[in-house]
Image: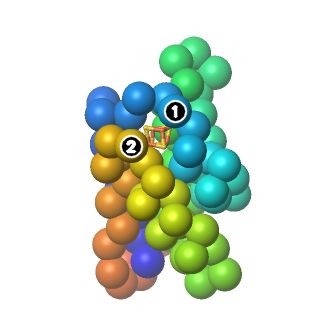
Amino acid sequence: MRIRVNRTACLGAGQCVLAAPLVFAQRDTDATIVLLDAQPPPALHEAVATAADVCPNAVIEVLDGEGPRE
Ligand code: SF4
């Protein structure tokens, strides 16, 4: 699983952080999303999928595959 986020579309609602606090955070300055782990381990995949589902503005994109570690 790889994750991409579109911060410019983020409303700062924080639903993603509630769903997956080990993967997402919010910036202190404007509450927009911070991606803490773009390739989370399998144990967090369900939480990430929930976060993507509950985000009100489709900011979180979940991609298949592991891809190279950055
Ligand atoms: S749930 Fe969506 S809109 Fe809200 S902070 Fe997270 S990414 Fe941004």
The N terminus lies in which quarter of the figure? Answer: bottom left
Farthest-out residue, top: 29
Q: Is residue 58 left or right of residue 11?
A: left
Residue 2 percent location from the top left of the image: 41, 70
Quote the CA–CA distance across marks 1 and 2.
8 Å
Residue 47 percent location from the top left of the image: 60, 68
The numbered dot on residue 33 is none
Q: Is residue 1 left or right of residue 47?
A: left
Q: Nearer the viewer, residue 50 or 33?
A: 50
Q: Are marks 1 and 2 in contact (CB under 8 Å)?
A: yes
Q: Is residue 60 left or right of residue 16?
A: left
Badge 2, how many Cα within 10 Å: few under 14, some, many 20+?
some
Look at the picture and state if 68 lies above or below 48: below
The answer to which image quadrant residue 27 occupies is top right
Residue 70, visible in the rendered structure:
no
Residue 39 percent location from the top left of the image: 50, 69
Distance from mark 1 CB to nearest ligand 1 atom below 8 Å: yes
The kind of residue tagged 2 is: Pro
Q: Residue at x 57, y 15 (%)?
A: 29
The numbered dot on residue 56 is 2
Residue 35 percent location from the top left of the image: 52, 48
The kind of residue tagged 1 is: Ala
Secondary structure of the residue carrying numbered label 1: loop
Q: Nearer the viewer, residue 18 or 44?
A: 18
Q: Earlier in the sequence, mark 1 or mark 2?
A: 1
Look at the picture and state if 10 lies above or below 40: above
Question: How does the figure colour the protein chain or chains?
Answer: rainbow
Look at the picture and state if 26 lies above or below 65: above
Distance from mark 2 CB to nearest ligand 1 atom below 8 Å: yes
Secondary structure of the residue carrying numbered label 2: loop
Q: Residue at x 63, y 74 (%)?
A: 44
Residue at mark 1: 13
